[in-house]
Image (cartoon, helix red, strand yellow):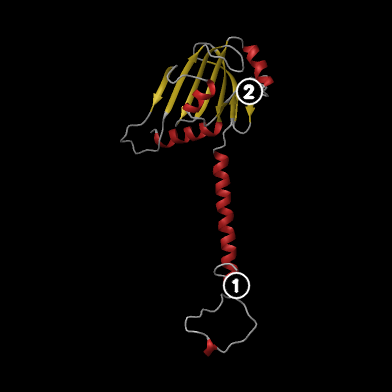
Amino acid sequence: MEKGAAIITNCRVPSSQYPESFTSPLAPSTLARRVVTLVIASALLLAASACKKKDFEPSKMVGPLYSYQSLETVERKLDLKPGDWDVLENRKPLSTDTRPMFRIFTFSKKDFPLLDTPGKNLVMTFYNDRLMTVQFYPYNMSSFKSALAADGVNLSAEGDGHIPPSTHVWLGKDDHGQLYVGFMDKVLEAEHDAWMAKYSQ
């Protein structure tokens, strides 16, 4: 029997025989309301947990790389030595900053292959130590597109693609006219943009 469950009996006992500490069972309507409230609260808690998990679901980017991976994890996945790259950006708040955490770390690794395709450069951006963006500069773009297709990623005629659940893939050109293929987690990008809109003024 569950703790706290009401004991129901068909025997009639004179009220004078109840001990002074006896508490009568809850009225059916009161008990029903409490059960319904408990069920609703449990459903809301489960829904909130599911939403939270969905919001932070890693999304495949390219090769062994997934969004939300830490710098340490990426180093291990790509067999990189710590610090064996060029830092392009390293923004982090002062210790006295009271705003929510905001750190951007971007590095480039030259002459690095992806999907067995030689590359001129590999650029990765981490937002709060979570991989958000990858830009790969292959020596041969056609070869890399074929490698992507073999990996299940097909670019449209406009040079766009999508990897579920939240990776946007695109063909881009940087300020120096160099072609690259970019991979970005749109959920992380939205989180980054929301922080900028709220706290960067």
Quarter of the rendering occupied by the N terminus: bottom right
Which residue corresponds to the image point at 54% horizontal and 34% vertical from the top-left?
A: 187
Whichever of callouts 2 and 1 sits on the residue coming sooner in the sequence is 1
Look at the picture and state if 18 lies above or below 130: below
Closer-to-camera residue (26/162): 26
- Residue flagged by tag 2: what amino acid is it? Asp
Look at the picture and state if 104 lies above or below 116: below
Q: Determine the residue located farthest toward the left in the rendered image.
A: 96
Look at the picture and state if 15 lies above or below 185: below
Image coordinates of residue 46 in percent, x first then y, are 58, 51
Which residue corresponds to the image point at 57% horizontal and 71% vertical from the top-left?
A: 30
Which residue corresponds to the image point at 45% horizontal and 22% vertical from the top-left?
A: 106
Residue 160, which numbered label?
A: 2
- Residue flagged by tag 1: what amino acid is it? Ser
Q: Is residue 156 visible?
A: no
Pointer 1: residues within 10 angstroms few (<14), some, or many (20+)?
A: few
Quarter of the rendering occupied by the C terminus: top left
Q: Which residue position holds label 1?
A: 29
Mark 1 and mark 2 in contact (Cβ < 8 Å)? no
